[in-house]
Image (cartoon, helix red, strand yellow):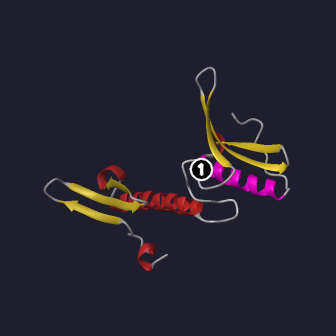
């Protein structure tokens, strides 16, 4: 990480516009061709320092998401390029959405592997229970464990998936 990116104000600009009374912090960041921008008003966030702290948190969240996407594109044994058939970059890990007969939607990450010839093993990790990033991370760990012949972390039986 560069020294500039480590700076507290990386991708954050101060906006003080006397003519309109606009005062606050603007976060502007572009990753993978997608532009992100959000304004944090001093008056809305309880002052200049609180607005700046909130802007930093937002910026850090964007950067963490961007780093996660880069991680997904790296070439570890179970990872590959993102293609039309694999949108997360990890072989054997899929994001599944299902709609039940009553119309409720369930979302989860599923890890799958073949421990033996003609036998498929899989585990599902609820997005509702773990959150999207954590469910993805656990599913990746489960697949790695399954490929090594180890017992993967089992999903909680009380989860909705």
Residue lying at the far left in this picture: please name it.
19
Residue lying at the far front in this picture: please name it.
117
- Please name the residue shown 85% across and 48% down the image: 117
- Within 10 Å of disc 1 (Cα), the crowding (few <14, some 14-19, many 20+) is some
Name the residue nearer the viewer: 38 or 112.
112
- Please name the residue shown 46% across and 58% down the image: 62
Q: Where is residue 40 in the image (x, y as percent from the top left)?
A: 34, 54
Q: Residue tagged by mark 1?
A: 86
In the rendered structure, which segment of residues is drawn in magenta?
132-148
Q: Quadrant of residue 160?
A: top right
Q: Is residue 136 part of the magenta span, yes or no? A: yes
Q: Is residue 37 above or below residue 99?
A: below
Q: Where is residue 90 in the image (x, y as percent from the top left)?
A: 64, 55
Residue lying at the far top in this picture: please name it.
102
Q: Is residue 146 part of the magenta span, yes or no? A: yes
Q: Is residue 130 left or right of residue 112?
A: left
């Amino acid at each position: 990480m560069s020294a500039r990116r480590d700076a507290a104000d990386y991708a954050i600009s101060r906006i003080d516009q006397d003519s309109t009374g606009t005062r606050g912090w603007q976060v502007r960041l572009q990753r993978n061709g997608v532009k992100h921008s959000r304004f944090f008003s001093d008056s809305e966030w309880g002052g200049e320092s609180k607005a700046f702290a909130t802007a930093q948190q937002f910026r850090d969240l964007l950067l963490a998401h961007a780093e996660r996407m880069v991680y997904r594109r790296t070439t570890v044994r179970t990872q590959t390029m993102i293609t039309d058939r694999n949108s997360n970059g990890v072989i054997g890990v899929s994001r599944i959405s299902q709609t039940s007969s009553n119309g409720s939607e369930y979302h989860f990450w599923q890890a799958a592997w073949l421990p033996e010839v003609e036998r498929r093993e899989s585990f599902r990790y609820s997005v509702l229970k773990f959150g999207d990033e954590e469910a993805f991370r656990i599913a990746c760990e489960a697949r790695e464990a399954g490929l090594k012949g180890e017992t993967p972390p089992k999903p909680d039986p009380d989860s909705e998936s």
